[in-house]
Amino acid sequence: MADAHRIGPVLRGWLQETLPAAGNARRLGVLTLIQSLGLGVFLTSSAVFFTQTIGISAQRVGLALSVAGLCGLLCTVPIGRLADRLGAGRVLTANFLLAAVGFTAYCAVDNFAGFLAVACGIAVLETSAGALQASLTDALVGEEERVRVSAQMRSLFNLGFLGGAVLAGAAIAADTSTVLYATVLTNAALQLVSVAVLLTMRGTPRAAEEAPQSEEAAGVLRSSALRDVRYVAIALVCGALELYQPLLTVGLPLWIVTRTDAPALMVSGLLILDTVLVLLFQVMVSKGARTPAGAARMLRWAGWSLGASCLVFALSAGHGGLLDSAALLGGALVLVLGELCQASAGWGLAFGLAPADRQGEYQAVFSLGRGLQQFAGPWLMTSLIVGAAATGWVVLAVLFALLGLAGPPLVRGLEKARARMEPVAL
């Protein structure tokens, strides 16, 4: 009974931390839940839908999605600039409307050329949506709350994605083309629901005059954000640290089934564990990343934790089912710590180091690192983890550690460069 009395206040405290406050923050949370539910439904069932329902070969699906990913990368920054001119809310509304059309179009595809065209269009929309939503978050909740709200949305994203994956699993089990078409149309409908939620949001982006600049600084910052070399470098470091995602979804499952004595059930078990832990602890961890300096330190911790997890995973091969499972579990727990730190650091740096009146373009540039990881990550994981075995894990560990160490000096360099461009008080 005493334990029950303690659990109640802890649960209430966690809910207060995790659920966004009433107003625009809560509407952003609802938007995240809707989007993640649709994404969970679609991504979990898409491979089966593309190959068995539409009839595209697995090799051609992979080729088309790689080309689509490249299209998404090329279009993200121009869309971010458009958001700075027209407003992130307007551009995101158009994004969701076009996504509804795109997902519906999948149901009419019956050849590879049509599939490639639709996949490229949707990749452009999906790749830019994250940067647009980040820019909208900054505009609606402001500097003090944007990292916290982003953490809350990531927790809610995991919850929605998990629910969508469960629904997709039921659809796949039904094993009928009608149900699979229904999953795609469900995602299209959820894009329209997202538009309805967006239309309820109210807020005014922070005015450019709130961040006065000297003529020299304004001239530099008005050039393409891609020329802000230090910011791009930080974005690439953060994006490379996100290699934990293909590690968790591609490399680790292949490692478990081909190199370890652990049961195949560990694949889904570790994914569920990761999802639940992010849901529980992301908001708490994000508290240390609400300034660029704090985010830079957290980036270092992320690199060290992710590197350490790789060394633990390397110990999980050929020692019997129990010991291999224990090593996999231990590695997953360390990996989650690195994942939580990396995500928090990314928000703190992406927001905190971007000019206040150019969040759309700068958030788009920051997302390029994530896009490159999505493009190259699966190949890298299969080459290192499956191809090189224990040596591959050590290479990944060193890579993560070096990326983490690179973060703080890059951030200090950017902040010093920005300080030199600030107007001197007379």
Image: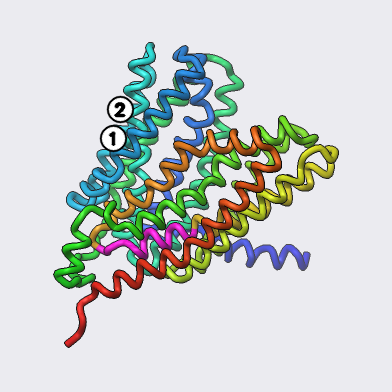
| Placement of 278 over or under 8, stated as above or below | above
Number of numbered markers? 2
Question: What residue type is disc 2 on?
Answer: Val
| Placement of 228 over or under 321, stated as above or below | below
**Quadrant the N terminus occupies:** bottom right
| Placement of 422 over or under 306, stated as above or below | below
Residue 16 visible in this rendered orientation of the protein: no
Question: Would residue 4 appear left or right of 173 to someone viewing this image?
Answer: right
Question: Would residue 108 appear left or right of 379 to someone viewing this image?
Answer: left
The span shown in magenta is 344-356
Front position in the image: 231 or 41 = 231
Whether pointer 2 and pointer 1 mark residues with C-beta atoms closer than 8 Å, the reply is: yes
Q: Residue at x 59, y 41 (%)?
A: 247
Q: Residue at x 25, y 58 (%)?
A: 358
Question: Would residue 247 appear left or right of 318 to someone viewing this image?
Answer: left
* Disc number placed over residue 97 in the picture, else none: 1
Q: Callout 1: 10 Å neighbours few (<14), some, many (20+)?
A: some
